[in-house]
Image (spheres, rainbow, N blue to C red):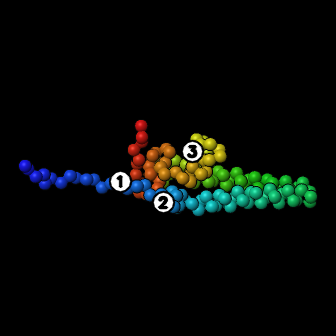
């Protein structure tokens, strides 16, 4: 009876995907852009509230404040859409999510992205292409 000394090569078990607390926006140092955008939209909201209060003072004041608030909101939106990008393919991920996901969940899905919907590169952990599951 021959003894089998050959070791069975066991590949290390695949690491369980750790649910890290950091999301890709933090990991790629882009979270500040989201905060700036929140402040911009907050400013828009404040301008609208102030404009509403100024209605008593006269439409010329409130009109200016409403216009400034709207411009701030539009500028903030245009900016944040352009700057939140995949670090690999530079795809405008915020815009991709707005276009492709439901309007009620796109921001949650954006923050929870694990790979780029455009180039399939991992956004969390080391940048590497994820095999596209056929
Ligand atoms: Zn990408």
Dot 1 corresponds to which residue? 14
Residue neighbourhood size for the residue with mark 3, other residues' Cα within 10 Å, grouped as few (<14), some (14–19), many (≥20): some
Closer to viewer: mark 3 or mark 1: 1
Q: Check disc 3 and report the residue beneath it.
A: 96
In the drawing, does residue 38 fall left or right of residue 64? left
Outermost left residue:
1
How far from the left and from the top, in percent, is residue 32?
59, 62
First reached walking from the N terminus: tag 3 or tag 1: 1
Around disc 1, counting alpha carbons within 10 Å, would you say few (fewer than 14), some (14 to 19), or many (20 or more)? few
Rounded to the nearest angstrom, the CA distance separating label 1 from label 2 is: 16 Å
The image's mark for residue 97 is none
Left or right of 66 on screen, residue 102: left
Residue contact at pointers 1 and 2, CB within 8 angstroms? no
How far is disc 2 from disc 3 in space, using C-alphas?
A: 24 Å
Q: Earlier in the sequence, mark 2 or mark 3?
A: 2
Q: Position of residue 115 (x, y in %)?
A: 47, 49
Local secondary structure at mark 3: helix
Q: Is mark 3 within 8 Å of ligand 1?
A: no
Which residue in the structure is indicated by mark 2?
Answer: 20
Q: Is residue 81 visible?
A: no
Task: Classify mark 1 as within 8 Å of ligand 1 or not, answering yes or no.
Answer: no
- On whether ligand 1 comes within 8 Å of the CB at mark 2, the answer is no
Residue beneath the point at 68% across and 61% down: 39
- CB atoms at circles 2 and 3 under 8 Å apart? no
Quarter of the image for residue 102 reads top right
- Quadrant of residue 53 within the rendered picture: bottom right
Instruction: Tell me the SS state at disc 1.
Output: loop
Q: Where, quadrant-wise, is the C terminus in this rendering?
A: top left
Could you tell whether 74 is left or right of 115 in the image? right
Q: Please tell me which residue lies in front, 26 or 2.
A: 2
Of labels 2 and 3, the one closer to you: 2
Q: Residue at x 64, y 61 (%)?
A: 36
């Amino acid at each position: 009876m021959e003894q089998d000394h050959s070791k069975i090569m066991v590949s290390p078990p695949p690491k369980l995907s750790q649910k890290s607390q950091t999301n890709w926006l933090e990991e790629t140092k882009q979270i500040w852009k989201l905060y700036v955008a929140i402040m911009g939209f907050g400013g828009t909201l404040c301008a609208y509230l102030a404009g509403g209060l100024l209605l008593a003072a006269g439409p010329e004041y409130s009109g200016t404040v409403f216009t400034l608030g709207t411009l701030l909101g539009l500028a903030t939106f245009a900016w944040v859409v352009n700057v939140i990008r995949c670090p690999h393919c530079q795809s405008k991920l915020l815009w991709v999510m707005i276009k492709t996901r439901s309007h009620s969940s796109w921001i949650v899905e954006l923050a929870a992205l694990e790979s780029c919907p455009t180039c399939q590169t991992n956004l969390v952990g080391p940048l590497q292409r994820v095999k596209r599951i056929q």
